């Protein structure tokens, strides 16, 4: 009988945020797969847990994924953890989950801390509908495609960002999204936890005098309904609408998706019209 892969959420800062269920799971499994074994070892030592560790991260996920699957198929129970927070969110753990599903291996979530959700609930921005966008690409073309794809989204937007890229990201967000409210959430659950509620144009100059420090979550106001309804591109033909986005650098697939979003119609309808089907 195959074992179970447990997706264990670990604290994003304050070790007191770990759950009793997570501790019990970490104590009971045969192996713990960790994004950074050194960091996870510190967590285990703090709670007096002694278990074998193996690394599983972005750079070894292909070969290590197969190894973990074989152990699971042999009946071993394995816990998967990230550096901090909920595993498989902006994290290579999602690939291991897919492998388990393909191999009919049970996957069980062990809930806990999530930086995105906690930043959202303290932001003061609408929480009913939101879109988690993770990290923006460092590739300029991919970054622009990503921002173009979400600028008309009316959901509250959530991004992660590292301190050394924050200033450039705030500038890009302002250029792409315009004047919107933003909550800059820093070092959640840690000693220097901070929430700055401001606007994108003000945020661009926020760190001119001192470089940003810590890990950041950016929570941004979605596009207004009026802007969505009055999108000037909607007066174009569908061919012109899609070609406008292609000329802006989007792939045909993304351009069709974006035009469908603008017009609030199914992608298939735009695809068929564009290809005269």
Image (cartoon, rainbow, N blue to C red):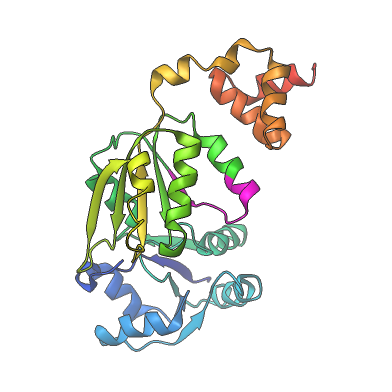
133 lies left or right of 49: right
* Residue 167: image location, x then y, percent: 43, 54
Considering every residue shown, the one lying at the far right of the view is: 276
Q: Is residue 137 magenta?
A: yes
- Locate residue 107 relative to residue 146 in the image: left or right: left
**Which residue appears at 38% of the width and 61% of the height?**
86
The residue at the far front in this view is 209
Quarter that holds the C terminus: top right
Q: Is residue 6 above or below residue 123?
A: below
Residue 156: name its quadrant: top left
Residue at image point 75% right, 20% down: 274
Judge whether residue 13 is colored magenta.
Answer: no
Residue 256 coordinates in the image, percent (x, y): 67, 28
Give the magenta range. Answer: 132-143
Q: From this view, report whether residue 92 is shown above or below residue 55.
A: above
Question: Who's the residue at 34% across and 66% down the image?
Answer: 213
Of the pair 264 and 204, the residue shown nearer to us? 204
The residue drawn where x is 72% and y is 25% is 243
């Amino acid at each position: 009988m195959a074992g179970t892969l447990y997706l264990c959420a670990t604290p994003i800062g304050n070790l007191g945020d770990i759950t009793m269920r997570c501790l019990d799971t970490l104590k009971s499994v045969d192996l713990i797969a960790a994004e950074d074994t050194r960091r996870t070892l510190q967590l285990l030592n703090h709670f007096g847990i002694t278990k074998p560790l193996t690394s599983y991260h972005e750079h070894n996920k292909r070969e290590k994924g197969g190894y973990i699957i074989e152990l699971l198929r042999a009946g071993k129970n394995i816990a998967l953890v990230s550096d901090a927070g909920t595993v498989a969110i902006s994290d290579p753990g999602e690939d291991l989950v897919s492998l388990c599903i393909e191999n009919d291996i049970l996957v069980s979530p062990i809930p806990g801390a999530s930086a995105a959700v906690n930043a959202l609930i303290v932001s003061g921005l609408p929480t009913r509908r939101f879109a988690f966008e993770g990290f923006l690409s460092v590739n300029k073309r991919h970054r622009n495609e990503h921002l173009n794809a979400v600028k008309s989204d009316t959901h509250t937007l959530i991004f992660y960002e590292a301190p050394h890229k924050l200033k450039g990201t705030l500038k890009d967000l302002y250029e792409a999204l315009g004047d919107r409210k933003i909550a800059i959430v820093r070092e959640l659950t840690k000693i220097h936890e901070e929430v700055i509620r401001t606007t994108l144009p003000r945020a661009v100059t926020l760190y001119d005098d001192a470089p940003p420090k810590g890990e950041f979550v950016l929570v941004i106001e979605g596009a207004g309904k009026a802007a969505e309804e009055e999108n000037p591109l909607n007066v174009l033909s569908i061919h012109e609408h899609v070609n406008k986005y292609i000329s802006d650098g989007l792939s045909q697939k993304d351009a069709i998706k974006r035009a469908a979003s603008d017009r609030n119609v199914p992608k298939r309808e735009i695809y068929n019209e564009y290809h005269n089907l």
